[in-house]
């Protein structure tokens, strides 16, 4: 695995920080060095939220990411804010249900996935973040699907089997999108 430096960004209430936590635990339980740094506006719900996640084979020197290898953008302001920071050859995953504009760069891989629409259709609108997370893991190959499931299992409280199963279902939808 190469070093993955990921920025996940969107509105508060979209599960941005939880998606980052899932990726961080996924890296941790799969033997990688990790860092998770959340950031959100004062309103939280409806305000802006983003988090920096680093998954690395080497120790992480700093949790701050200035040149992300990947961006998961769940709203247009977040895409515009972080798009130019992604390294050339990097990855940008866009929730095309909420972002109609195209990524302006042609030197990055872009995945457009209608995560919010898919989550709505699955009866779990608040889990569009898990669809985006599944798509990221598939696109990068940082871990396999079972490795991702181990990560989300660490984030869902024990005894909440229905919630865990719903999260796994939506992770799978993102992981298998386009197949």
Image (cartoon, helix red, strand yellow):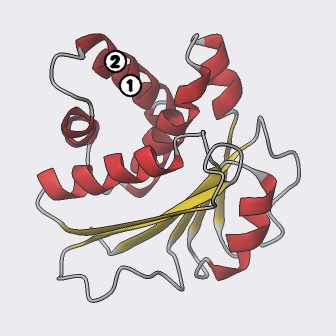
Crowding at mark 1 (Cα within 10 Å: few <14, some 14-19, many 20+): many
The residues bearing labels 1 and 2 have C-alpha atoms spaced at a distance of 6 Å
Q: Is residue 142 above or below residue 175?
A: below
Callout 1: helix, strand or loop? helix
- At horizontal 60% and vertical 57% (from top left) the residue drawn is 49
Query: Which residue is more in the foreground, 106 or 150?
Result: 150
Q: Which quadrant would residue 9 be assigned to in this image?
A: bottom right
Which quadrant does the N terminus fall into?
bottom left
Res 179 visible: no
Closer to the camera in the image, 171 or 10: 10
Percent across and percent down for residue 78 are: 71, 61
Pointer 1 and pointer 2: residues touching (CB < 8 Å)? yes
Q: Is residue 29 visible?
A: yes
Above or below, comparing residue 37 to residue 134 in the picture: below
Extreme residue in the bottom direction: 61
Relative horizontal placement of residue 71, taking residue 19 as reference (left or right): right
Residue occupying the point 54% across, 84% down: 67
Residue highlighted by disc 1? 167
Provide the secondary structure element on which disc 2 rests. helix
Q: Is residue 133 above or below residue 33?
A: above
Instruction: Give the number of the mark in front: 1 or 2.
Output: 2
Residue 119 located left or right of residue 103: left
Residue depicted at 15% across the width and 24% down the height? 158
The spot of residue 123 in percent (x, y) is 58, 10
State the residue position of label 2. Answer: 163
Corner quadrant of residue 159: top left
- The residue positioned 51% from the left and 34% from the top of the image is 131
Q: Position of residue 120 (x, y in %)?
A: 66, 17
Label drawn at residue 39: none
Res. 112 image quadrant: top right
């Amino acid at each position: 695995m190469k070093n993955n430096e990921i920025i996940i960004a969107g509105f508060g209430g979209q599960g941005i920080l939880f998606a980052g936590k899932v990726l961080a635990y996924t890296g941790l339980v799969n033997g990688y060095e990790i860092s998770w740094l959340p950031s959100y506006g004062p309103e939280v719900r409806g305000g802006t939220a983003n988090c920096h996640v680093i998954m690395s084979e080497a120790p992480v020197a700093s949790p701050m990411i200035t040149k992300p290898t990947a961006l998961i953008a769940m709203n247009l302001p977040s895409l515009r804010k972080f798009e130019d920071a992604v390294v050339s050859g990097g990855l940008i995953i866009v929730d095309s249900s909420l972002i109609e504009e195209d990524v302006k760069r042609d030197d990055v891989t872009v995945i457009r996935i209608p995560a919010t629409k898919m989550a709505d259709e699955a009866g779990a609108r608040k889990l569009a973040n898990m669809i985006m997370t599944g798509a990221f893991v598939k696109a990068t190959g940082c871990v396999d699907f079972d490795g991702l499931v181990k990560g989300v299992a660490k984030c869902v409280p024990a005894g909440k089997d229905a919630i865990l199963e719903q999260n796994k279902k939506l992770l799978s939808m993102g992981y298998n999108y386009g197949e």
